[in-house]
Amino acid sequence: MRLRHRLALLLALAVAGFAVPLHTLPAFAQSTVAEMPPMPRPRPLGLPTQPTQTVSPAPANEAAAEITAVTSMPQPVTLSAHITPEGAPIPDGLVWRIFESTVGSDGEMALMAKSDDGVAHIELPPGEYVVHVAYGRAQLSEPMSVAPGENAKDFVLEAGALRLNSAVTGDIPIPPSMLKFDIFAGDDSSRAMVAEGLLPNDIVTLNAGTYHIISHFGTVNAVVRADLRVEPGQLTDATLYHHASQISFKLVSEQGGEAIADVDWTIKTADGETVFSDLGAFPSTVLAEGDYVVFAKQGEQVFNREFQVQPGSPREIEVLTAVY
């Protein structure tokens, strides 16, 4: 009996000893499982791999394409010009040039269009431009914007005209072939040539303003200057008067005699400045009012004479081979 009691006790202790670990194991197992990351499910063997799908880019915005097409398409542009705001359109004689508003790498604005019509009809893409219009020597430059649709712009040149002539004091006419005119703009410190070598009675179209006029009678020193005002829409007629005269020379052995040939001529002012030289029997020139000396050289001999020029009709100076 005692032995059986001991075996029962040992059996109970053994059962109790194993019960403690079995009681704590579930808690330990739960902690370990919670800290492990989830494992992916294995792919079944033998199944084909699904291809990767490529997403195509969205189609271009059709509205944006339409806007681009409209804004780059050339648009109709009509250009016209007037001499004065209230004047009629200029029918012809205009030169139109249209430039880009920005300067290129060469420092110039690109020429986009040109027309010689009185009313220019051109086409330009929408954008900003500079329009230059010239009418004779009158000209104007202005910016212009071109938008989709019909475009029209009118320019006012504020131009006038000038007609020039000259005469010798006393209303003595001058042969037109002996006159030339130069026109300058600006003041004395910064004058710019507007027109050079104009003939008398030529009508020149200019922007309204004040101009400096130089009249050349002959090619030596007969020069007259004047400042003239050009009014918009008006023709200004001006006559400039010269204090000068046409002078011809001849070397003679006696007064009223025949001109001697092969003479070398030199004309000097009273200050010794040479203003004219020529070779021949009967030279002619135009000299401004003043005192002069003429030298006539024939071979080794030189003959001279003092003379005075006064405004008037053409005159002749005889140089005698005798000593004065």
Image (cartoon, grey):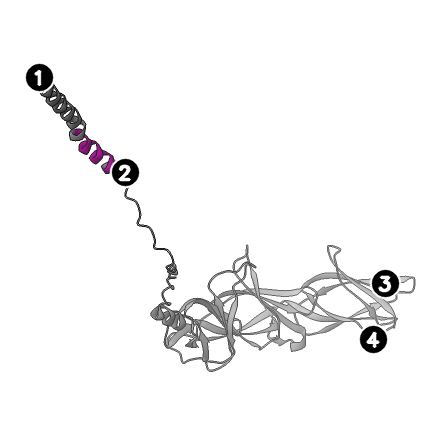
Q: Which element type, helix, strand or loop, lies under badge 2?
A: loop
Camera-side mark, 3 or 1: 1
How far apart marks 4 and 3 lie (CA) works out to 17 Å
**Looking at the image, is mark 3 or mark 1 earlier in the sequence?**
1
**Looking at the image, is mark 4 or mark 2 earlier in the sequence?**
2
Q: Which element type, helix, strand or loop, lies under badge 3?
A: strand
Write the residue at 11% across / 18% down: 3
The residue positioned farthest toward the front in the image shown: 1
x, y (%) of residue 77?
42, 76
x, y (%) of residue 148?
37, 73
**Looking at the image, is mark 4 or mark 3 earlier in the sequence?**
4
Q: Magenta: predominant secondary structure element?
A: helix
The residue positioned farthest toward the left in the image shown: 1
Q: Give the residue pinned by disc 1.
A: 2
Closest to the observer, 299 or 292? 299
Q: Which element type, helix, strand or loop, lies under badge 1?
A: helix
Write the residue at 90% across / 62% down: 301
Magenta-drawn segment: 24-33
Q: Give the residue pinned by disc 3.
A: 303
Q: Quadrant of the C terminus?
A: bottom right
**Looking at the image, is mark 4 or mark 1 earlier in the sequence?**
1
Instruction: Give the residue type at disc 4.
Output: Gly
Instruction: Give the residue type at disc 3.
Output: Phe
